[in-house]
Image: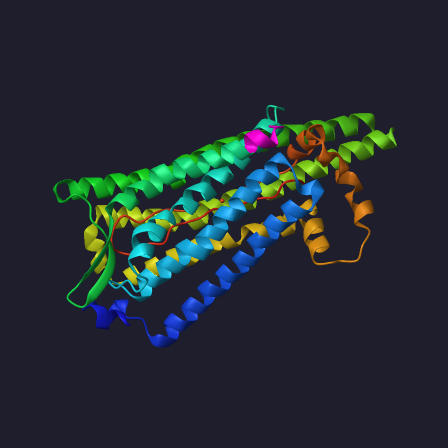
């Protein structure tokens, strides 16, 4: 059902057929790659013993949340967009599944926060979390809190409305305080899904970068002082410098992707909530579609970041694909990861990251999921 058939809308909101098909094809292709990539990450962590570490518990939690974004939040957003003011999926999916899909956003974002804090503790404070059980409990808490903050209010106000030939999934906030409650919910979602997480991540990564910079400078000055007389010590110093540089290479794309891809949807939602007149902005639909693409990209790119910057994930992916090489030999430098002590030492060298949001108006705004990083360098 086209938009104009559903309701009288401005012409600029009715896309040409070729543009709509092309845009949806790109979005679905990105989502498909993201689904396959996140599934590969989960399988790699579950099947490969050397991948079972504390940091990878958080990465696996992030991959599960990103899968939820791509398999539930994104399809629901497409349905709302393509059948504006019309809900073809029935009452149950409207009042239960649609609000619950928001939980994936919060879990994705806070998984990135846990990873950044884990990196900070390991690299700066030398106090990396060793307990797998505690890591799983932290992940479980992130699901509970995200449900309470993002989903519970929507479960209360979401209604399936049918009448006069229309079927829609709407939010019925109490009429007396509707405006303030919608704004309050939007502000809380943006604070929970973007402002607070990004602040924590930037602070921890600033500390990490400063620590790594000081460490690299110290290693280089020490090597020069030795004048390369001890070849074994020199090689060791060079390896430490390379590992620090690899950690920087991981931290940079993680922070940049998280901040850039989740900014548009959060700004869009806040502006639309505070300035309803923007509904008549001529390029509103273009901005909305850009937010959708950025959101899908955010949840899809994490596995590819792992594949590019993480030796361990590349090795696990090759093993899953049946690459014929001596993995016992290749695994030797990472064998210590099987023990908590070894995992502590390795986590200091790597980094990880990813976000999403929620919509509080009837205008469909897709939520945003998170980005990620790898476990060991």
Work out whether residue 46 or residue 234 is closer to the camera in this orientation and state it: 46
Image quadrant containing the C terminus: top right
Q: In this view, does 230 lie above or below 268?
A: above
| Residue 212 placement: quadrant | top right
Work out whether residue 213 or residue 359 is closer to the camera in this orientation and state it: 359
Mark yes or no: residue 294 visible.
no
Residue 134, magenta (yes or no): yes
Residue 129 percent coordinates (x, y) = 60, 28
Residue 128 percent coordinates (x, y) = 61, 27
Residue, far left: 176
Work out whether residue 152 or residue 55 is closer to the camera in this orientation and state it: 152
Mark yes or no: residue 220 visible.
yes
Image quadrant containing the N terminus: bottom left
192 left or right of 206 in image = left
Work out whether residue 128 or residue 87 is closer to the camera in this orientation and state it: 87
Q: Is residue 222 above or below residue 80?
A: above
Magenta stretch in the rendered image: 129-135
Residue 164 percent coordinates (x, y) = 15, 66
């Amino acid at each position: 059902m086209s938009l104009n058939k559903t309701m009288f809308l401005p012409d600029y909101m009715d896309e040409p057929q070729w543009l709509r098909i092309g845009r949806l094809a790109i979005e679905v292709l990105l989502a498909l790659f993201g689904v396959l990539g996140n599934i590969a990450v989960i399988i790699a962590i579950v099947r490969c013993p050397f991948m079972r570490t504390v940091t990878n518990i958080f990465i696996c939690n992030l991959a599960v949340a990103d899968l939820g974004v791509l398999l539930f939040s994104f399809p629901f957003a497409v349905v709302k967009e393509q059948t504006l003011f019309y809900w073809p999926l029935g009452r149950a999916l409207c009042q239960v599944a649609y609000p619950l899909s928001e939980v994936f956003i919060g879990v994705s974002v806070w998984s990135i926060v846990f990873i950044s804090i884990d990196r900070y503790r390991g690299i700066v404070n030398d106090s990396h979390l060793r307990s797998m059980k505690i890591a799983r409990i932290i992940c479980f808490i992130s699901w509970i809190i995200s449900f309470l903050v993002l989903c519970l209010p929507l479960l209360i106000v979401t209604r399936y409305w049918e009448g006069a030939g229309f079927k829609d999934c709407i939010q019925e906030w109490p009429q007396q305080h509707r405006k303030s409650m919608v704004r309050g919910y939007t502000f809380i979602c943006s604070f929970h899904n973007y402002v607070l997480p990004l602040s924590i991540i930037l602070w921890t990564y600033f500390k990490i970068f400063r620590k790594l910079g000081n460490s690299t400078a110290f290693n280089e000055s020490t090597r020069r002082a030795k004048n390369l007389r001890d070849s074994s010590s020199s090689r060791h110093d060079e390896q430490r410098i390379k590992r620090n540089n690899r950690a920087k290479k991981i931290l940079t794309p993680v922070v940049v992707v998280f901040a850039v891809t989740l900014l548009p949807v959060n700004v869009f939602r806040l502006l639309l909530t505070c300035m309803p007149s923007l509904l008549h902005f001529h390029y509103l639909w273009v901005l909305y579609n850009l937010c959708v693409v950025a959101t899908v990209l955010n949840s899809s790119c994490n596995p590819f970041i792992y594949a590019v910057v993480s030796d361990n994930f590349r090795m696990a992916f090759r093993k899953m694909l049946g690459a014929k090489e001596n993995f016992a030999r290749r695994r030797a430098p990472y064998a210590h990861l099987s023990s908590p002590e070894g995992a502590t030492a390795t986590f200091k060298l790597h980094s990880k990251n990813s976000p999403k949001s929620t919509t509080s108006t009837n205008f469909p705004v897709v939520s945003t999921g998170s980005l990620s990083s790898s476990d060991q360098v």
